[in-house]
Amino acid sequence: MASSPVSELSDGPVLSIIGKHLLALHKKHSRILQMEESRTKGKTLNKEQEEILRSKSVVITAIDELEKLQGSCTSVDAIAGSPRDDGEMRSKPPWTAVDDKCFGGSVD
């Protein structure tokens, strides 16, 4: 799923970047699965393909971590943009809450 400028505005730049990285990792994982299938059918893989196969656990771990981060940022973004009980918006801009949660610090 490619990110468009419209989705970047609605998702925000952090979620857009995470989505792009997830897309690339899912493509790499798909290629790894295809290589594994080829190998089980008896095809010989070259050194580069073998190296890619060895990275499977790293790719899976990266996908899991980015999906967790994406979910965390999505929920924080929804909370940061929601009105307070008294009807007032939060004093900090919504993206600072996302930065605080996702990157462990404040951008103030």
Image (tube, grey):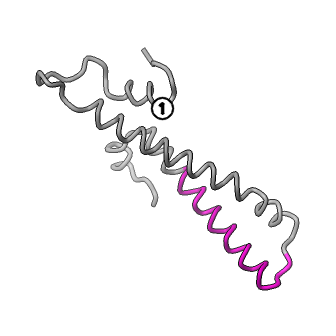
Q: Residue furthest left?
A: 86
Q: Secondary structure at mark 1?
A: helix
Q: Residue furthest top?
A: 108
Is 40 within the magenta? yes
Chief secondary structure of the magenta span?
helix
Q: Position of residue 18 (x, y in %)?
A: 50, 45
Q: Determine the image quadrant of residue 51.
A: bottom right
Give the magenta range: 21-44
Residue at horizontal 76 percent and vertical 63 percent from the top: 53
Q: Position of residue 69 (x, y in %)?
A: 49, 41
Q: Looking at the image, is 91 positioned above or below residue 4? A: above
Q: Looking at the image, is 51 positioned above or below residue 97? A: below
Q: Position of residue 106 (x, y in %)?
A: 45, 18
Q: Amino acid at mark 1?
A: Cys
Give the side of residue 76 with respect to residue 62, left or right. Answer: left
* Quadrant into which the N terminus falls: bottom left
Provide the residue designation for mark 1.
Answer: 102
Give the side of residue 30 with respect to residue 38, left or right. Answer: left
Q: Position of residue 39 (x, y in %)?
A: 79, 78
* Quadrant into which the C terminus falls: top left
Q: Determine the image quadrant of residue 60.
A: bottom right
- The one nearer the camera, 16 or 88, is 88
- The one nearer the camera, 19 or 66, is 66
